[in-house]
């Protein structure tokens, strides 16, 4: 006995409203289980209301479904972490490693030829772009999404992506906007331009790893 | 599980049970797994949803299971199946548990010494 769309909506409401289930993947999986349990009880003559009530209790009610959601979050976080490590490792593999070294060498040779003022603007831009990327993600991903993309943004924030950008901005902003910028920062950039650009490159690589991570869909394939 | 003692006894073997069931079938969904265990044990053993799904999610995160979804009766059904690693791991874990049970049985069948 298949449930009607209205009855399925009723069960979905229980999961979202009572169970506080936030992720679409968990809702889909639990809805199917909840509906199957309800249908089973209806086949032995129970009314929908009574059957769903018993099925809800069998699912463990609010606490039970929240525990299942927590296990889902933990599992996805584990997958994200593993995927991120794989991505980061891939940057240091042949031939990516050779490319990275060659780019670094090029930077080392070119940087001394760039006027300090322009170098500061460049490093500022490199710092701003990942920062904007994280802000956009924070807004759209963290606050709006109900899929696993939200978990990736949580992971990103937890991994101090935002802190890295803020640190970078704090290093660069005074140099660009203030007349009497902190002399030590300016001296650092003038004395060690290659180091500062290498920091920017690493920052970009770190950001790129998150872009790649986000492109990896933690959704289930439909058949 | 049925009782608290059953629950603790089966906690460690739940993932092996899931792997064994999936080794037998190409793919299964959560509810189907609970019913299969119930049928196989004539209702003696029941897996609660609170134990089943965390175990499934863990196995998936470990790369032993893969999932696909299908629309059935107006709702999304998530099927689990073994990955290549899952097949290898399943064989190892089943053999390990079987050996453990065999040894446990020897101890449990110990005759009182005269």
Image (cartoon, rainbow, N blue to C red):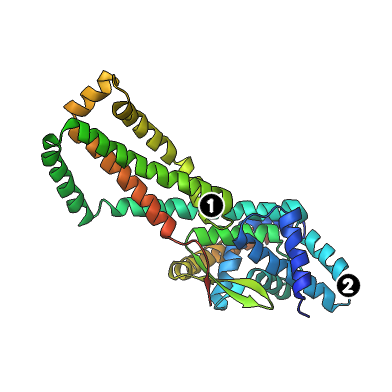
Q: Which residue is mark 1?
A: A150
Is residue B79 visible from the viewing direction of this image? yes
Q: Residue at x 60, y 53 (%)?
A: A71
The subunit carrying tag 1 is A
Check disc 2 and report the residue beneath it: A47
> On the rendered structure, is A190 left or right of B79?
left
Q: Quadrant of residue B108?
A: bottom right
Q: Secondary structure at mark 1?
A: helix
Q: Determine whether, in the image, residue A133 is placed left or right of residue B5.
A: left
| Labelled pair 1, 2 in contact (Cβ < 8 Å) | no
A184 or B51: nearer the eye?
A: A184
Q: Nearer the viewer, residue A175 or B109?
A: A175
- Vertical side of A37 occupied by B14: above or below: above
Locate residue B18, reporting x and y percent: 59, 67
Q: Is residue A152 left or right of residue B20?
A: left
Give residue B94's position: percent from left, percent from top.
54, 67
All told, the count of numbered labels is 2
* Residue B11 percent across, percent down from the top left: 64, 56
Residue A87: mark: none
Question: Residue at horizontal 29%, vertical 42%?
Answer: A202
Dot 1: within a 10 Å radius of its alpha carbon, few (fewer than 14), some, or many (20 or more) residues? many
Q: Secondary structure at mark 2?
A: loop
**Residue B13 in view, yes or no:** no
The residue at the point 72 percent across, 59 percent down is A15
- Mark 2, other Cα within 10 Å: few <14 / some 14–19 / many ≥20: some
Is A146 above or below relative to A103? below
């Amino acid at each position: 006995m298949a449930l009607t769309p209205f009855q399925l909506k009723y069960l979905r409401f229980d999961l979202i409203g009572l169970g506080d289930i936030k992720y679409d993947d968990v809702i889909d999986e639990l809805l199917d289980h909840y509906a199957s349990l309800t249908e089973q009880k209806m086949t032995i003559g129970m009314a929908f209301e009574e059957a769903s009530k018993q099925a809800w209790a069998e699912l463990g009610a609010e606490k039970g479904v929240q525990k299942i959601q927590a296990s889902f979050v933990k599992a996805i976080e584990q997958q994200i972490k593993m995927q991120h490590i794989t991505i980061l490792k891939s940057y240091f593999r042949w031939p990516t490693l050779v490319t990275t070294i060659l780019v670094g060498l090029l930077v080392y040779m070119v940087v001394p030829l760039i006027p300090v003022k322009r170098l500061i603007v460049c490093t500022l831009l490199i710092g701003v772009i990942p920062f904007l990327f994280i802000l956009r993600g924070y807004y759209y991903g963290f606050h709006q999404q109900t899929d696993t993309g939200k978990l990736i943004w949580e992971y990103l924030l937890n991994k101090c992506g935002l802190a890295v950008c803020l640190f970078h901005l704090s290093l660069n902003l005074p140099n660009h906007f203030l007349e009497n910028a902190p002399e030590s920062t300016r001296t650092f950039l003038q004395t060690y331009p290659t180091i500062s650009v290498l920091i920017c490159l690493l920052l970009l690589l770190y950001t790129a790893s998150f872009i790649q991570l986000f492109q990896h869909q933690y959704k289930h394939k439909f058949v | 599980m049925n009782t608290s003692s059953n629950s603790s006894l089966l906690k460690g073997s739940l993932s092996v049970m899931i792997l064994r069931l999936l080794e037998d079938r190409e793919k299964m969904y959560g509810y189907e797994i609970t019913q299969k265990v119930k049928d196989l044990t004539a209702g003696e053993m029941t897996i609660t949803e609170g134990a089943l799904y965390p175990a499934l999610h863990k196995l998936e995160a470990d790369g032993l299971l893969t999932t696909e979804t299908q629309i059935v009766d107006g709702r999304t059904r998530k099927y689990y199946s073994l990955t290549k690693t899952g097949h290898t791991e399943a064989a190892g874990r089943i053999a390990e548990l079987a050996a453990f049970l065999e040894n446990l049985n020897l101890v449990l069948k110990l005759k009182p010494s005269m």
